[in-house]
Image (cartoon, coloured by chain):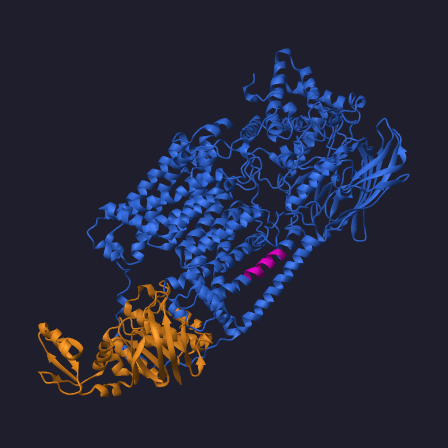
Chain colours: A blue, B orange
Amino acid sequence: MWHEIFKFELKYRMQRPETFVFFGFLLLFSIVGVDFIFQGVETGLVKMNAPMIIAKTMGAITGIFMIMVSMIMGVPVLRDYQYHTEALLFTNPITKWDYLLGRFLGSLTVLVFIFTGLVIGMMIGSQMPWHKEEEMLAFSIFPYIQSFAVVVIPTLFFGAATFFVTGMLSKKMLVVYTQGIVVFVLFLLTKAIKNEYLQGLLDPFSLTTLTQYAKEYSVSELNSLAITFNGILLHNKLLWMVLGIGILSYGYYKFSFSALTKKPKRILNKTVKKSKNYTNTSLLIPNMSIHIDFRSQLIQLYELSKFYILSLVKEASFWAIVLCGMIIIMINSVNLGTVYEVDSYPETHFIIAELQEMSMYFFIIILLFYSGELIWKERNNKQYLLNDATPISDVITLASKFVALQSIYIILMLSLISTGVLFQAFSGYYKFELGVYFSGFFIEIYPFLMLYTFITFFFQVISKNKYLGIFLTLIFFLLTIGLEVFGITHSLLKFGGKPLGTYSVMNGYGHFLKPYVWVKAYWIIFGVIVFVISALLLNRGVAISLPSRIKTISNRITRPIKYTSIALFSVFFMLGSYIFYNINILNTYWTANEQQTFRMEYEKTLKRFEYIPQPKITAVDLNVELYPENRSYEINGTYTLQNTTEEPIHEVHIQKLIASHVSLDTISFQGGAIANTAYQKFEYTIYTLSKPLAPSDSIEMKFTQSFAPKGFEEDHSDTQIVHNGTFFNNSILPTLGYHKKYELRDNDLREEFGLATRTSKAEISDTKELVNSRSGSDSDGILLQVRMGTSKDQTAIAPGNLIKQWKEDERNYFIYQTEQPIINFYAITSAKYEVIQDQWTSTETTIKPVDLEIYYDKNHFYNLDRMMSAMKTSLSYFSKHFSPYQYEQLRIMEFPRYAEFAQSFPGTIPFSEGIGFVLDIDDKTDVDMAFYVTAHEVAHQWFGMQIEAANVQGQNFVLETLSQYAALMVLQQQYPKEKVAQFLALQEELYHEKQRKAISEPSLALVTNEDFVYYHKGALAMYKLQEEVGEESVNLALHRFISDWNTHNGKIRAKTDRYATSQDVLDYFRMVTPKDKQHLIHELFETTKNVNELQ
Amino acid sequence: MQLIIDNISKTYDNGVQALQGISLKIPKGMFGLLGPNGAGKSTLMRTIATLQNADSGHISFNDLDIYKDKNAIRKVLGYLPQQFGVYPKMSAEILLNHLAVLKGITNKKERKEVVHVLLDRTNLYEVRKQNLGGFSGGMKQRFGIAQALLNNPKLLIVDEPTAGLDPKERNRFYNLLSEIAENTIVILSTHIVDDIKELCHQMAIINRGEVILKGKPLDLIEQVQGKVYQKTIDRSEFDTYKNQYQVINETFFMGKPVVQIMNNSNPGNGFEPINAGLEEVYFSQINQSK
């Protein structure tokens, strides 16, 4: 008997449009599936159609479309209930077993059919022209079928079983909609599990499981081995299948035919009335007044909104969503702002970021389903026959539903905010910045939701049913993303504009807010126009088709609507013009293509000047006036240029910074020069000196440069000059000669434009680069003087001794000067700083004391002691073992978290607020990363400031790996052995993790930009070396290295014009290494062997 | 005060001609619309209630064209559809209040008062806090009546209002209706002939989308008075009678078939004259037009 029901179910489903709509949608989506799921993920050498990639994509897409599973599986029993066919059905002689089995298997079959769209779509996708040949394997149907069978079918079975049972037992459509989220929440919950095996086991979509399944795989194995039921994947699938069967059995046990036909209870009792009935007839219907003026429409809007809010908050599913959101926040907030496994204090912006990421899913669910629910409510429950015959305006009806949905978002937001506050309180963090919470939600997230509400309302109004409306909205959503891929990124064309830039505690939303607000205003007006159109097309009365509603739309355009529309269009147009004026006229709007072409032409035209002889900058004198309030500056500068070559120099090539609103107003050479402006397009000018610069001679070059941003830009790229937390380095100033940084980097694009492949570093034997310490270096060291003015509440900091400080015209002025040459790489910062000061004195009396200063934001006082202690310990250790510290001060300056790093400049260390300052270090469980990072940066005062390395392969070994070693030794001195071991274990983990994804792995001696080699492997290798040959010996080698290669007075350095390389360092290591361990130097630094396997 | 329906026609997308040139003038008081199921009554009422557009023709209320300004008629309209639904999770009081807002009763005090009075008059006051999802058919119908009266309508359209009501409730409702009809146009659609007879001053019979008879019930009865005869017959004779006479109705009396015929004079043959009522008028029209 069950097969009759099975056949009926199949036949019924095959006539339903949604079966094919779902199939088609899945198929279309899957064509771009791999690109969508792995968008922005570095897959390295793993091919885009490797079995692992296919399996993960399938798993992820199945997860995303759980809702589809729910819509198919949740309804079969519910349908009978809804259409009241249950009485007909259940009086027939069928058993519960037949009925349920038939329905379940029938729907499951249809479900599997729908999901074959995934397989077909992905196979078609693999043949799409946008895949490059080298990133694909030869096509084979097998991995698709196998991944589908192993990964997708069991997930579908579990989903099918669960949704079938919940749909059947709850008998509510809304449960059917929302249960997809519950599974997603489950998935998120598993992400919070620390234990890897458990996390993999419990992942319902098997994504983590797959990662762990192939944890030990090499790239070639990832590309070749099929996904089979094995290991953790087998356990995972078994678990979920068994759970599915369990749920089915439970459902079978709980379900009863008679219960289905029973009406809800509660009807009877109260209908029995006392017989005093007719005494009431005397009550006449009182006189009341009917209003439809503007004021009463506002009252209607208010009252109706209240009613619709009430109707939504009565849905249990809404509270389930709120609760899930709260739980997720609680779970995810446990690890916030994690840097090297150390969590940060739960500063509000971290929680906001977490909320934004996680809650988006909930908001989208609410947006999609509740908008459908609201628009279709009266039609579905047939109350529209009453409502539509009342004199309510369509605009008011739609507006009140709109307001209700907005209120629902707001209720959810407020619940999430209170959860965040609760979490902070539980963590002992009592600085509740409600303002940051509110701006995070109401400025960053809310406009997006509001805009999409306009869109969903529109699609719901023009659709024949709710599902079509949801579907159209989804298509719209994907289209917006798709258009972006095709380069439609201009804020005036990309629906909704762009997200707001990073929030910084120091700088707030900074200058990002203004363009954001304007663009949002523009799109909101657009949304209101869409809204008015929706109201005009709103279905009223008995099924009037969309075309006839469009035909009769003029009947509905009343005078007020007409004038409002005209006003809206005018405002829309004005806002658009204003934004266009700012982005495209006041500023230059570059499309990606224009940018690429410019870079290509730059290289093709100017590359020939790359190594022409140029003088070197030997002294810089700057007079900087910084105006943080309007993000502008004026700089008067003088460069002293010396001819260090053997031949006279006739021409000086000046490259101005290519950036908008930066102008190099004047430039003049001592003795005069004639400008050749042939390359003005690239802001590259060749000055022919009136009198050639003889070898060893110097001249002065004076310039004035200014920066004054106008209006606002499309992208928030410039984060150097900001309202609070300005941080820039000398690369904004004019430079000498061709500059490699303007070259096109992407090698695929380079090939397209006919440019040679660009390597990230020159070969170690490249004689042209051996004499450079940086790309296009125009100096071998300078004396610097900076006179700097900034606003009255800010402190400006530059390298050198603070010579003078005063106030003038309500501004703060500072003069900094260096006593000895520094590298031509220095930073200037200005912000509202607090400062703590201390002093370090050496045990050797010949060395001057060093002033220690940390300039920090008033909110970020947590780790100052740790940083200060790191500076002191480092200075002691390095001075004692390597060489004396060269400056009279060492300063740390905090800067906004637009970048998350700390960077050493001469005597100054700009340090991002995103790392170190807010780490919540628990000395029991964590490594003191604030201490470590500080020590590493202090080490750069030696490896970077004293020693400069040639701009060739291995440069980062000399600078970074040696700094890692130095910091590690300081850590070892300050903390117990276990902490060092913990630190090394993390380095090893990070090394392997990044190594697996890497395209190639060089040895340390030839490392280029592979940070997993020079940071993580570097730390491991140096630690190993020091274990094997002894800390004293390694330090001795480094001491000798520095004294020979020190940029300013090194014994060897003074006799050569080249800079030190990794090979030089290794020579010093070899000198201190006993014979029997010499092979280690080779193996650790010149091979890619695993450090821990070396003997 | 009058409602003029002028030559209204409506054909549905599936080809069914629901209304074919219907014209009626409806004055103040109770107007009965009688017709079998599927005659087009509900379509006509929905059209008057602005829920549906006619393909051609005009409807005007007090010289107001309802297609030009639908909201003008909606302001004075009370409408009780034949079948309707409600928000199941809302209480009667909240939902009635909601509908009052929709009708434009924006003064809170007035709204509260009218909601309470109507809940009282429809005997729902004590269950006003209950969710409508738990209401019985009769209770829901009474709720429908309450909402139709909210704005003290000048034009009240009630479509099969007594379906689901018990006789006592039905009487109470008709009392209410006749009270309202004193200064209101009330259009009552039904297929129960007695309802019309008891209540209406004017009536029309609609079949297959056409008005086949209109007038005052008493006049109409007068027209057939003395022309209706009936006879108890054998089941087997039925066809013979059908061919021979103008049979307007077949009923049963004590389990035996009874035929009623129209004839201008006494046909003899065992037929006996009966006192004609509205029912006979109705059947004579409906069965003639078959």
* Residue B106 to residue A686: above or below: below
Indicate the position of residue A196 as horizontal and vertical percent values.
46, 33
Q: Nearer the viewer, residue A282 or A588?
A: A588
- Residue at (81, 30) in percent of width and height: A613
Indicate the position of residue A840 as horizontal and vertical percent values.
73, 33
In the image, taking residue A971 as reference, residue B168 lies left or right, namely: left
Magenta segment, which residues?
Answer: A518-528
Residue A626 visible here? no
Residue A475 visible here? yes
Indicate the position of residue A311 as horizontal and vertical percent values.
41, 62
In the image, taking residue A257 as reference, residue A589 lies left or right, namely: right
Q: Nearer the viewer, residue A758 or B14?
A: B14
- Residue at (11, 83) in percent of width and height: B271
Chief SS of the magenta region = helix
* Residue A88 to residue A609: above or below: below
User: Quarter of the image holding residue B105?
Assistant: bottom left
In the image, taking residue B9 as reference, residue A128 lies left or right, namely: right
Indicate the position of residue A132 as horizontal and vertical percent values.
55, 35
Asked whether A519 falls inside the magenta stretch, the response is yes
* Residue A380 to residue A651: above or below: below
Q: Nearer the viewer, residue A22 or A44?
A: A22
Asked whether A1006 falls inside the magenta stretch, the response is no
* Residue A985 to residue A7: above or below: above
Quadrant (top left/top right/bottom left/bottom right) for the C terminus of chain A: top right
User: Quarter of the image holding residue A935?
Assistant: top right
- Residue at (53, 39) in percent of width and height: A129
Count numbered badges in the picture: 0
| Furthest residue in direction front, as rendered | B243
Q: Nearer the viewer, residue B173 or A510?
A: B173
